[in-house]
Amino acid sequence: QVQLVESGGGLVQPGGSLSLSCVASGNISSINEMAWYRQTPGKKRESVATITSDGITKYADSVKGRFTVSRDNAKNMLYLQMNSLKVEDTAVYYCWAEEPYDGPAWAWDPDFGSWGQGTQVTVSS
């Protein structure tokens, strides 16, 4: 499994910007889908943005138009540019990478992939 390490979290005022980075231990060019998730205490981890190896992106409705996900396969990096941040964006953000899975589709869960350790993003005045 690939090892993932996030960086770039911190404290920012509402309306501000932050850029998160995730470095992978191996070659990510063969990984179809990578993503950013976030989690707040007492809530389930939610998908924020996904990107395929072909560069196709998908965003949660709550971040559309404000967040941009990108990847650099040559550098084994995943990025998340977050603009116009809101208090409700406060969470621990996790980098995620799809791993090979040969079980039934109905049983697939993101936990079959690889996770980073998370980085805290706090939006507060």
Image (cartoon, grey):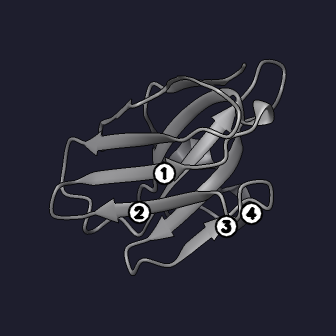
- Gap in Å between the C-alphas at discs 1 and 2? 8 Å
Q: Earlier in the sequence, mark 2 or mark 3?
A: 2
Q: Residue at x 71, y 21 (%)?
A: 124
Mark closer to the observer (2, 3): 2
Which residue matches tag 1?
81
Which residue matches tag 3?
105
Quadrant position of the N terminus in the picture? top left
Mark closer to the observer (4, 1): 1
Mark 3 crowdedness (10 Å alpha carbons): few <14, some 14-19, many ≥20:
few
Q: Nearer the viewer, residue 44 or 63?
A: 63
- Gap in Å between the C-alphas at discs 4 and 3? 4 Å
Which residue matches tag 4?
106
Task: Say the numbered circle drawn on residue 122.
Answer: none
Element carrying mark 3: helix
Q: Which amino acid, by three-letter code, is at mark 1?
A: Gln
Element carrying mark 1: strand
Residue 32, given in percent of the width and then of the height, sits at 41, 69
Q: Is residue 28 left or right of residue 7?
A: left
Q: Residue at x 78, y 18 (%)?
A: 41
Q: Which amino acid, by three-letter code, is at mark 3?
A: Ala
Q: Earlier in the sequence, mark 1 or mark 3?
A: 1
Which residue matches tag 2?
70
Q: Earlier in the sequence, mark 4 or mark 1?
A: 1
